[in-house]
Image (tube, rainbow, N blue to C red):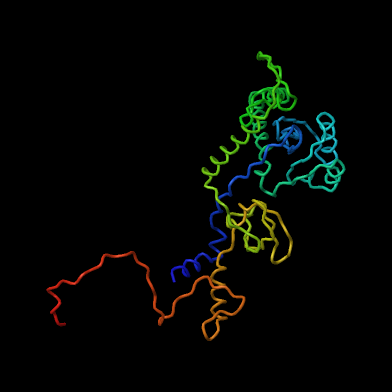
């Protein structure tokens, strides 16, 4: 009875709509590519006060960074700038981008198909999936804000930042992006000791160790755990925007889970039939299914107490006539006192 009461309370639709979001799922770390410029990520930062935007490109292997100032961020302009970058470093095998209109167009898909680039789009409203470039955007934005506050030319300060960044050893790999990208150390105002080029096998080991350390720390700090969402579940979707304060955190529309790969979940609306991609962190399973199963099962029981074919019962109460066996731990053997043997009740 206690379980039935608990499940009944959990099945309250209104409580589910305003309940706290689920804890995030554990981080999924990306394996280091085998060579520079094999896999890259791109994103736009802006607009800036004068209307410009910055096209940020980062290499997953070396963490080498390209920042391009653009006044027009259409798909055509984006492809033009990417071709300029590719003419210097080559065509990558994989390109990860968000769902911006520049990267979500048919023109951009044809461009990637023509150059045999595997285009990976992030989950909508989940920028963490493109965390490498998003982290760089934050650092660049901090530098631009400092330049703005001190009255300096942000373009000059940005170039100084990139030079310092490319020459500094990265925390995850232990090597400077310039060194991993081009096989040599970058000359700056600081003196550089000449060294013999060596193979960077230890780079992969260090990158893996640092990523695992960061994953454990982040998962523990965020109390991450697997959501348990699976295909066939019915879920509610977290609102990305609220029109007013009385909006619930989750939309009341019900969705069916079509598939789940990691934190990437494809859902289908039960009313319109449209499909969407969302992160598992933005979904909440609708409780109460266990109660419905039990009720349906009790209605379909046969006269002899057996369950009809196709029904599932998670728990069954014993009949009053049945003997209930209670498991207890062993007790010592008690011997009746001899002085009570002649006692008559």
Q: Quadrant of the N terminus?
A: bottom left
On the image, the x and y values in percent for residue 162 come to: 70, 25
On the image, the x and y values in percent for residue 3 come to: 46, 68
Q: Residue at x 55, y 50 (%)?
A: 225
Residue 14, visible in the rendered structure: yes
How many discs mark residues in the rendered view?
0
Which residue ends up furthest to the right in the rendered image? Answer: 114
On the image, the x and y values in percent for residue 74 come to: 82, 41
Q: Quadrant of the C terminus?
A: bottom left
Picture quadrant of residue 93:
top right
Compared with 46, 239 (above or below) is: below
Compared with 241, 252 (above or below) is: below
Q: Residue at x 59, y 80 (%)?
A: 308
Residue 51, visible in the rendered structure: no
Picture quadrant of residue 119:
top right
Quick one: 291 or 343, which is closer to the camera? Answer: 343
Quick one: 334 or 109, which is closer to the camera? Answer: 334
């Amino acid at each position: 009875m206690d379980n039935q009461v608990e499940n009944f309370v959990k099945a309250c639709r209104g409580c589910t709509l305003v309940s706290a979001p689920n804890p995030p799922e554990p981080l999924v770390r990306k394996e280091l590519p085998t060579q520079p410029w094999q896999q890259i990520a791109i994103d736009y930062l802006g607009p800036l006060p004068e209307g410009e935007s910055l096209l940020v490109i980062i290499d997953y292997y070396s963490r080498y960074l390209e920042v391009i100032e653009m006044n027009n961020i259409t798909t055509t302009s984006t492809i033009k700038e990417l071709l300029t970058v590719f003419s210097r470093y080559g065509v990558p095998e994989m390109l990860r981008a968000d769902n911006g209109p520049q990267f979500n167009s048919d023109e951009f898909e044809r461009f990637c198909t023509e150059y045999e680039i595997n285009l990976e789009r992030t989950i909508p409203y989940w920028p963490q999936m493109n965390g490498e470039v998003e982290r760089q955007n934050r650092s660049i934005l901090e530098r631009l804000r400092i330049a703005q506050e001190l009255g300096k030319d942000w373009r000059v300060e940005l170039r100084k930042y990139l030079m310092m960044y490319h020459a500094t050893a990265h925390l995850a790999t232990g090597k400077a992006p310039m060194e991993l990208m081009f096989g040599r150390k970058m000359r700056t105002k600081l003196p550089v000791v000449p060294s013999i080029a060596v193979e960077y096998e230890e780079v992969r080991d260090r990158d893996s160790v640092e990523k695992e350390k960061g994953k454990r720390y982040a998962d523990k700090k965020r109390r991450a755990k697997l959501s348990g969402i699976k295909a066939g579940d019915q879920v509610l979707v977290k609102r990305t925007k609220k029109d007013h304060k009385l909006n619930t955190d989750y939309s009341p529309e019900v969705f069916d889970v079509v598939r789940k790969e990691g934190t990437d979940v494809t859902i289908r609306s039960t009313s319109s039939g449209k499909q969407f991609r969302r992160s598992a962190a933005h979904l909440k399973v609708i409780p109460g299914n266990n109660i419905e199963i039990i009720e349906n099962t009790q209605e379909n029981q046969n006269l002899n107490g057996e369950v009809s074919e196709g029904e599932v019962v998670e728990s069954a109460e014993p009949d009053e006539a049945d003997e209930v066996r209670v498991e207890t731990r062993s007790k010592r053997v008690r011997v009746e006192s001899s002085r009570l043997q002649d006692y008559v009740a």
